[in-house]
Image: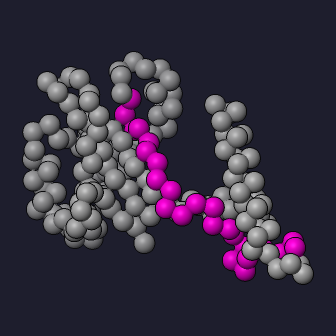
Amino acid sequence: MKYIHFILIAGLLLIACNQVNQESDPAQPDTVPATGSILVADDIIYDVIIKPLVEGDLWEEEKLKGYNGTEMINDLFDGIYSGEIKAFDYFTGKSMSPNKIKKIEAQEGFERENIGKIQFTEKWNYNPVTNSIEKKITSIVFGYEYRIEGVIRTGYKAVFIIEFQ
């Protein structure tokens, strides 16, 4: 696992260094953009499994031992119902009303406890002055477990998108 982290960090540093050289003034090769940070990834999308696929999978449980997202999930649903947060259809991008979300929650097989995946869209910026990486979440999609006969997981079904400014 440490090896994968090392490769990821090394790759990000190589990309960032290349971008610094391309964006720098030729007369001053060591300058960085005025903001001090370099855009490394714009709208990068990745999934995080937040519920082990198999009960008793020690590796998955170890990876998730620090996760406690139930309150966040409930707060985001409450924000949609109160109108403070807008939800959008995953496939069409159209706005979804709180009533539409309530219908989804009322569907057979849907339970908030079965949200097992979060898909993040993020922007990543690298600051060569501070050697830091800033990740900004721009949207999330909840995926709930899609089951057959209540037992066999066949994957995840997207619930909706929440976009952040």
Q: Check the image and name the residue furthest to the right.
A: 27
Identify the residue at image location x=36%, y=65%.
163
On screen, 81 above or below 11?
below
- Does residue 104 belong to the magenta stretch? no
On screen, 136 above or below 27?
above
Q: Check the image and name the residue furthest to the top.
A: 56
Q: Who is closer to the viewer here, 39 or 115?
A: 39
Residue 132 seen in the current view: no
Q: Position of residue 154 (x, y in %)?
A: 26, 30
Q: How is the image coloured?
A: one colour
- Does residue 31 belong to the magenta stretch? yes
| Quadrant where the image shows the C terminus | bottom left
Find residue 86 and report its image quarter.
Answer: bottom left
Identify the residue at image location x=63%, y=66%.
39
Q: Which residues are magenta?
A: 29-52
Q: Position of residue 84 (x, y in %)?
A: 27, 71
Identify the residue at image location x=64%, y=31%.
1
Q: Seen in the image, is 102 located left or right of residue 68?
A: left
Residue 39 seen in the current view: yes
Q: Seen in the image, is 123 located left or right of residue 91?
A: right
Q: Seen in the image, is 94 located left or right of residue 69?
A: left
Q: Position of residue 66 (x, y in %)?
A: 49, 38
On screen, 164 above or below 4?
below
Q: Position of residue 79 (x, y in %)?
A: 26, 64
Report the number of numbered marks.
Answer: 0
Find residue 82 and report its image quarter.
Answer: bottom left
Q: Who is closer to the viewer here, 112 or 108?
A: 108
On screen, 86 above or below 74?
below
Identify the residue at image location x=36%, y=22%.
54
Q: Seen in the image, is 90 located left or right of residue 103?
A: right
